Amino acid sequence: MIEAVAIMSLAKRIALAASLCVLSVGCGKDGDNRTGVLKYFLEQSATSTITNTLILEVDGGEFKPGFSLSGEGFTADIPFGTKKPFSARTELKAETFGDTAIVLTLYQENGKAYLTDTLLWKSSGEVPPRPEPYFSELASSDPYVYLVLPADRGANTKEVFVEGDLAPGFATGSYYTIPADDQVLLELSPGDGLKTIRVKYRNIFGAHSEVVELSIPKKAQGPENCKAIPVALKTATGSIRTRIQAVNNGPLFYRVTGDVATVRDYIEFTDSIEEYIGLLGSPGRKNITVKIKDAAGNTCPDIKLAIDYDTTYVPASLAIEGNPLWTDSPDVFILPHFDQLAGDTIEMQVTGNVFANANTFQWLPYAERLGTRKYSGRCESQHHRLCRGV
């Protein structure tokens, strides 16, 4: 007696990429406890070899139906079309790679067939391509990062295996079904530092690609000692030379906004960089903001500068110490000034009505105070200074 049949259609089974069917079976008089649940399926619905196994399982009950196999393009370890006693495993071998239909027939105890179904087996020697993954960011300030998998991996490659410096429980590796947007969210292991993972594909046939390794810095500590240093707070031109710097383990990025001629995207630099920042519009007070961040997105506080754009401004000047109108001493000290940044190489030369000595008539390293001796005590003596950048 067949008590109930609940079987998945072949079309639905293919659509769901599964080969598991469940059948409630039983035989005997009322009150007999011989009813059980029969499951029949292929060990793998798709394989990378031409071998597979048909599985029959009965959960509960005593009745175990006989069965037979038929079809084309494969062999089995039982003769085709011959009713055989129940067997948990039956080995199959396809003649070649491709789609193979396995026709299974189940029999009652009286030998009569009561169900015939077809299981589809796909096999292929296809191997997934070499992965070319990358992270969604250059570095991460938190444990979570997306692994991006380029879509040109083939329609049959649907899983990715990831292992490495991942959160506890995932370090030894896990398979992930590749989402429609080709991005897998990963949780990195605790602590800052360079995190390395290994990636390989697995296709529907069970074949693996080669393993690819990639790394990403995890960094919660942001840049320190961030500065934007203009050469002066005034300029006679439409730009201001500015040194931008910070202390950081890894690349840095800066961006200048506000009253600037052009607002650009972040520009990468290491340790220190100089830029002539173009100012917006006509002369006047210009307020600009310098933003500095690291690759993980950690930012410094905004650096705000106020620059006066004044076309009459002169970046160099010369004075006599004490600003005297005249002097009885032949020795005077000159006080040069030239807008510059720390580390600039500036030279100067003193000529005119002065004695020739170590401080005159030759190029010298820039100094903010320099002694010299005049030819005479006349206050109309002239002193001239030339500066040049090297």
Image: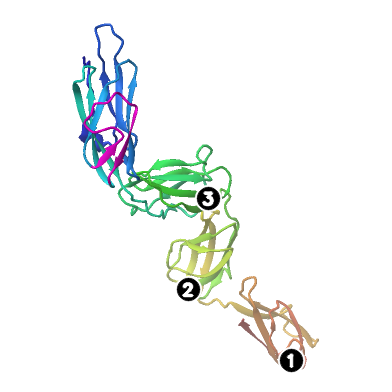
Q: Earlier in the sequence, mark 2 or mark 1?
A: 2
Q: Kindly identify the amino acid type of the residue bearing the numbered disc 2.
A: Gly
In terms of secondary structure, what is the magenta stretch mainly?
loop
* Residue 12 placement, left or right of 250: left
Q: Does the image show residue 228?
A: no
| Residue for point 49% across, 45% down | 163
Question: Could you say where residue 14 lies in the image, as x and y percent from the top left?
Answer: 24, 37
Outermost residue to the top: 31
Q: Quadrant of the N terminus?
A: top left
270 in relation to 28, above or below: below
Asked whether disc 1 touches disc 3, contact meaning CB atoms under 8 Å apart, the reply is no
Front-lying residue, 91 or 42: 91
Snapshot quadrant of residue 4: top left
Residue at position x 43%, y 64% in the image: 264
Tell me the mark number nearer the camera, choosing from 1 and 3: 3
- Tell me if mark 2 has few (under 14), some (14-19) or many (20+) residues whose alpha carbon lies within 10 angstroms of its own: some
Q: Is residue 89 magenta?
A: yes
Q: For this rendering, which residue is in front, 273 or 325? A: 273
Going from the N terminus, do you reach mark 1 or mark 3 first?
3
For mark 3, what is the residue? 196
Residue on which disc 1 sits: 354
Determine the secondary structure under disc 2.
loop
User: Which range of residues does the magenta coloring cover?
Assistant: 73-95
Alpha-carbon span between mark 2 and mark 3: 47 Å
